[in-house]
Image (cartoon, grey):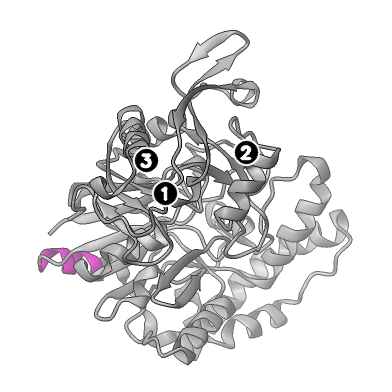
Amino acid sequence: MPAIVIVGAQWGDEGKGKATDHLGDRVDYVVKFNGGNNAGHTVVIGKEKFALHLLPSGILTPGVTPVIGNGVVVDIDVLFQEIDGLEARGVDTGRLKVSASAHVIPDYNRTLDKVAERFLGSRRIGTTGRGIGPTYADKMNRIGIRVQDLFDEKILEQKVEGALDLKSQVLTKVYNRRAPSVQQTVEELLSNAERLAPYVCDTGLLLGQALDRDETLLLEAGQATLLDVDHGTYPFVTSSSATAGGACTGSGIPPTRIDQVIAIVKAYTTRVGEGPFPTELLDADGEFLRNAGAEFGTTTGRPRRCGWYDAVIARYAARINGVTDFVLTKLDVLTGIEQIPVCVAYDVDGVRLDDMPVNQTDFHHAKPVYEFFPGWSEDISGARTLEDLPKNAQSYVQALEEMSGARMSVVGVGPEREQAVVLHPLR
């Protein structure tokens, strides 16, 4: 059986956790392949809500093996806080596997992340301050600490010492902050090593063998397409590859084993942090979407910036990821809006662009070109087929499908697991 990739089609927070959970009982492994605890998934099962930050959503599905892949950066303290929290609620986390090649977030990178963001002032990126970016930078600079290093204290000490030769200079001389000692950092990293050991393995080998046994893998992205370090709205992006291509490098799965890419797209648009956002609403409509959609960060609690659906972005995500299926979430949030605008193109200095501008300056100055669709007032939370939706809601979904570059296979009509209209089975 092949692997399936789930990615976000906008700037994140589209509802990937729900989509992963929706497929959970049809797959054998759920793999997180990028990011760290700088983003979160919220999954609602019955009357219980689970907020996941570092763990894959598959941790909530009995029988599924959740995997933290080599492309993830791991804050070990956060990992065990999540594990303990789920275990206290009766969730079995014993099947979790962690890549020996995943990088670990040391204390000095959390400090650097926070002080660097403050130092940038008005030029800040809008990071979460959790050390994600500096840890990925260390990875590329080849001074990073990997999970496997925690099991060789001598190697660990050498690597920490090498990293701190540079970091301590930056912290003390640029940011006027006291750098941690080598011993302090080593002790912190080793404090959970014994507990972590049973979870650690060669996850690339594990997943390859699973595919050879005709088992199904679900690869879930953290963040989203427009936050991808290569294909997102740079520099207002994350530090990893959040697109379908990143699923291969972040898990060890070759592209030839992937035959389905599911992109999650919200029925409107949100983003957190700094950067351009053509359809952003700074008025009562934006406040309505924020409150009706509970648009506050799962990890940070920050209010999300809200705007109308952007079909240009959706088409871009379809192209970059090779999307086979869209899952449209939060359609119910639009209930009660008399007329719903949809951005179908951009106006940049009087020129209409139907595709993403090639440069950041044009995107920053892009003004949305809207088409308007009649809304609906009926409660759609109980809809399970397209015909159950009001005619105007049906027309809205069909219009988004036509302009977004791939079919709409599932439509979310509420936060709970079963609140979905399935137009085409995902698997």
**Is residue 96 toward the left or the right of residue 133 in the image?**
left
In x, y percent, where is residue 352?
A: 51, 12
Residue drawn at the location 34% of the way across and 38% of the way down? 397
Horizontally, residue 268 falls left or right of residue 360, namely left
Q: Give the range drawn in magenta.
A: 206-213
Instruction: List x then y, in percent, for residue 218.
Output: 28, 61
Work out whether 302 lies above or below 398. below
Lower sequence index among marks 2 and 3: 2
Cα gap from disc 2 to disc 3, whole angstroms: 36 Å
Element at label 2: loop
Q: Quadrant of the N terminus?
A: bottom left
Q: Mark 3 points at which residue?
A: 393
Residue 382 part of the magenta segment: no
As drawn, 344 above or below 276:
above
Quarter residue 245 falls in: top left
Q: Nearer the viewer, residue 421 or 219?
A: 421
- Quick check: marks 1 and 3 in contact, CB under 8 Å? yes
Instruction: Give the tally of numbered discs.
Output: 3
Q: Which of marks 2 and 1 is nearer the N terminus?
A: 2
* Secondary element type, mark 1: loop
Give the residue at mark 2: 235
Q: Which amino acid does label 2 sit on?
A: Pro
Front residue (pair 188, 323): 323
Where is residue 109, by image quadrant?
Answer: bottom right
* Residue type (three-letter) at the residue carrying disc 1: Glu
The dominant secondary structure in magenta is helix
What mark, if any, has residue 28 been given in the picture?
none
